[in-house]
Structures are given as C-alpha cells and as structure tokens.
Image: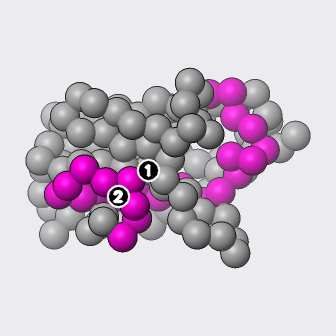
C-alpha cells in the first residue's frame, strides 16, 4: 500500500506560481509511475502530468508552464506551476501507478487532493 498526501494548494492571482507536493509513505515511489490530475465539479478527472524515472509527460494545456519532478530520497513528487491561469482552478490530486499511464483508471493510489484557485 502507498499512502499519498497532497499539499501546497492555495489562492493565487493569474500569472502567479504555486508548487504542489505529494509525500508518499508505505512504499518507496521510485518504482512507481507518478502522476498529477485535476478535477473541477461536474467534470471528469483530467490528466495534468506524469513522470517515470526521468521522462516527464504533460497535457497540452499545461505544457511549458508546469513541471513535474520527483525526489526519490524524500519519497516526494512535486508539480511546479507557473504562469497560472483561471482555467487552472481545480482540485489537484497526485497518484501512483505501476505502469506508464495518462488515464485515471490506471492509477492505483491517490492523494486526498489540494485546492488550487487562480483569480483573474
């Protein structure tokens, strides 16, 4: 079992930055494919970014603005979000999978989510 705790969300103005953290416990995440998703009320959970050993993948909507990284020694994954837009407002979740995936149903473990609100 992997337990994930998301943090770092908050309220920021458009153009600002936030860094989300996902702290894992229970197992080392070095063997997992780690992803970030986001969800707004009434919509499906949306893929944002994922990272394998060193390769990262991004949704087109965040490419060039968001950066996913991992610190295996700290058992933590990060999502650096720059140039934030109001449409980035959502609850952000980190997740862990044993296989490379961008669909939420392929992920086995989830954090509790952290709210990101971007004001215009």
Dot 1 or dot 2: first in sequence order is 1
Mark 1 and 2 residues: CB-CB less than 8 Å, in contact? yes
Quarter that holds the C terminus? top right
Q: In the current view of this chain or complex, which residue is farthest to the right?
A: 120
Question: In which image quadrant can residue 70 be found?
Answer: top left
Residue 13 image offset from top left, x and y in percent = 79, 36
120, 8: nearer the viewer: 120
Q: Residues within 10 Å of mark 1 (few under 14, many from 20)?
A: many
- The mark tally for this picture is 2
Circle 2: element type: strand
- Quadrant location of residue 65? top right
Residue drawn at point x = 31 percent, y = 39 percent: 51
Q: Where is residue 10 in the image (x, y as percent from the top left)?
A: 65, 48
**What residue would you read off at disc 1?**
36
Residue at the image point whose x is 12% and y is 47% from the top: 31
Instruction: Identify which residue, 54 or 6, lies in the foreground.
Output: 54
Q: In which quarter of the image is the N terminus?
A: bottom left
The residue closer to the viewer here, 69 or 24, is 69
Q: Position of residue 5 (x, y in %)?
A: 37, 58
Q: In this view, does 44 lie above or below 68?
A: below
- 120 up-or-down from 32: above or below: above
Say whether residue 85 is magenta: yes
State the CA–CA distance, disc 1 to disc 2: 6 Å
The residue that mark 2 highlights is: 95
In this rendering, the answer to whether 38 lies above or below 49 is below
Q: What stretch is highlighted in magenta?
A: 82-105
């Amino acid at each position: 079992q992997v337990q994930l705790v998301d943090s770092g969300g908050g309220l920021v103005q458009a153009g600002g930055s936030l860094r989300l953290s996902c702290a894992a416990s229970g197992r080392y995440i070095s063997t997992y494919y780690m992803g970030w998703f986001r969800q707004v009320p009434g919509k499906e959970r949306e893929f944002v970014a994922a990272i394998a050993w060193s390769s990262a993948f991004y949704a087109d909507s965040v490419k060039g603005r968001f950066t996913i990284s991992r610190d295996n020694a700290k058992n933590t994954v990060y999502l650096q979000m720059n140039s934030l837009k109001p449409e980035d407002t959502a609850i952000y979740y980190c997740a862990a999978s044993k296989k490379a995936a961008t669909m939420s149903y392929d992920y086995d473990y989830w954090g509790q989510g952290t709210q990101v609100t971007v004001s215009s």
